[in-house]
Amino acid sequence: MNNQNKPLERRRFLGGVLAAAVLVPMGGSLASCAGGGGGTTSGPSGAVSDTNPFGMADNSTIDAVIFKGGYGIDYATYAGELVQKTHPGTTAKVAASTNIAQELQPRFVGGNPPDLIDNSGANLIGINTILSQLEDLNSVVNAKNLEGKVIKDTLYPGVLAPGTFGDKLGAINYVLTVFAMWYSASLFEKNGWTVPKTWDEMLALGEKAKGQGKYLFCWGKEAATYYLELAIASAIKEGGDDVRLALDNLKENCWSHPAVQSVLTAMEKIVKAGYVKPGGSGTAFTAAQAQWIHDEAAILYPSGSWIENEMKDQTLPDFKLTGAPVPTVSSGSKFPYTALHSAAAEAFIVPSQAKNVAGGKEMLRVMLSKDAATNFAQKQLASTIVKGTIPADGFGSTALVSQTKMLDAAGDDIFTWGFVDVYGMNKDLLVVWNTFLDGKSDVATLTSEMQKITDKVRNDSSVSKVEVK
């Protein structure tokens, strides 16, 4: 199972708002790695052109190591086959790994890293620790794709921020995750319900759902902080960048920001009204999700776009899984209702000491072309960072169609944050959110407990801090 298919504590939120160059340290370390420079290793070379921008030689070998998680490795194999077609005699070797840092550390130390790496999974390489050993991938996004378009012009806004370190693009995150409120369009159509755009509308919908013997929300113990994600996204939309920066930078009293408090207060009303299915703190998160997507005991569920693939075997026929932006508190919110929490993941890197640096970049260029990106979307029912790769019918997926619509509607109003996973706070946050959703604490208690968790990290001198701008 890949990052996107795990409870919140196993996933990474990277970057800042839009194209902000935010440096987020990642787990794992290769501090003992040999070498250093940023220069390209010498090796066979070919003529440089728009169709061969890195001068990759024919009859060469590309060594790619891909994290084998929820997305598998077939999409990389497909890209490798495209490279082989355009470069006669080339062999693209795609190897799977489930433990990137542990398996590749000896190769880095030995000065023989792969040409292309999907730096993903729970045990990934700390990019900030080997940045000097990585190629600057600005050359890739400034190159033309297979269709003759400059790659950076084909990407969704802000997706390069997570891998940007100063002026250097050390990694390109390939897969785009959209966070939303998910629901059954067929159920909503049957009952004449509309998706709430404000928390007042959400409260009113809860009453309607109750009239049909259903709950508004349900949750599972390992994923109680999916509702934290919902709360943060809504608060950022309401209060703007001030909220995001205060939380990401672990500021004093950040959880007391008026926008955060207004969202938590709205959520407390829903809990107290009995619109949240009881017992979530004793229910496995997949079982809770089945209560929603199979039993229809609840009508809304906050999650990332991995939810379709994760629950495909339990989704009711004709469920018409659809996503919608999270609500704002008021019509005067700093960001519009259409603003969206979305983040790029699956970080690809090209080591400078690789034997075929040009080949690694070429394979990544091909992956970012429309052909390969469309293949990924069709097979994985998930979007890459490349725009325009999902047809109007979403390959038969209503969820995928809704993702495209949400991204298009959001435009440049796309944001994300990193503090929860960067500082490993989710384990402690799960405890207080399970208690809150159980109705056993109030907003004041939740706020106090979350601030304590945040203050503990901020005041711990042994924890390296990241300033987010």
Image (cartoon, rainbow, N blue to C red):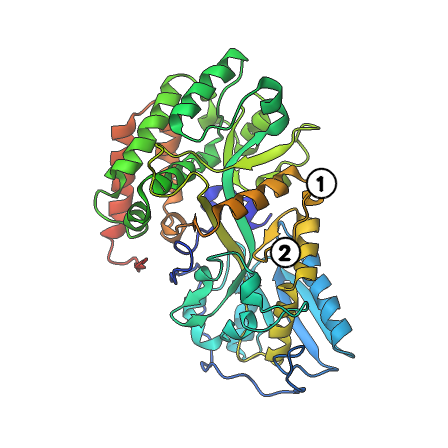
Amino acid type indicated by mark 2: Lys
**Position of residue 131 in the picture relative to residue 236 (left or right):** right
- Residue placed under numbered mark 1 in the picture: 396
Q: Compared to 211, does 16 lie above or below? A: below
Q: Residues within 10 Å of mark 1 (few under 14, many from 20)?
A: few
Of residues 4 and 204, which is closer to you in this image?
A: 204
Residue 24 horizontal/vertical position (percent): 39, 59
Q: Residue at x 54, y 55 (%)?
A: 121
Q: Which residue is mark 2?
A: 68
Tag 1: amino acid:
Gly
Point 45% across, 37% down: residue: 226
Q: How far from the left and from the top, in percent, is residue 200?
A: 38, 24
Q: Mark 2 falls on what kind of element?
A: loop
Horizontal side, residue 195 vs residue 453: left or right: right
Residue 233 position, x and y percent, is 40, 41
Residue at 37 percent across and 32 percent down: it is 433
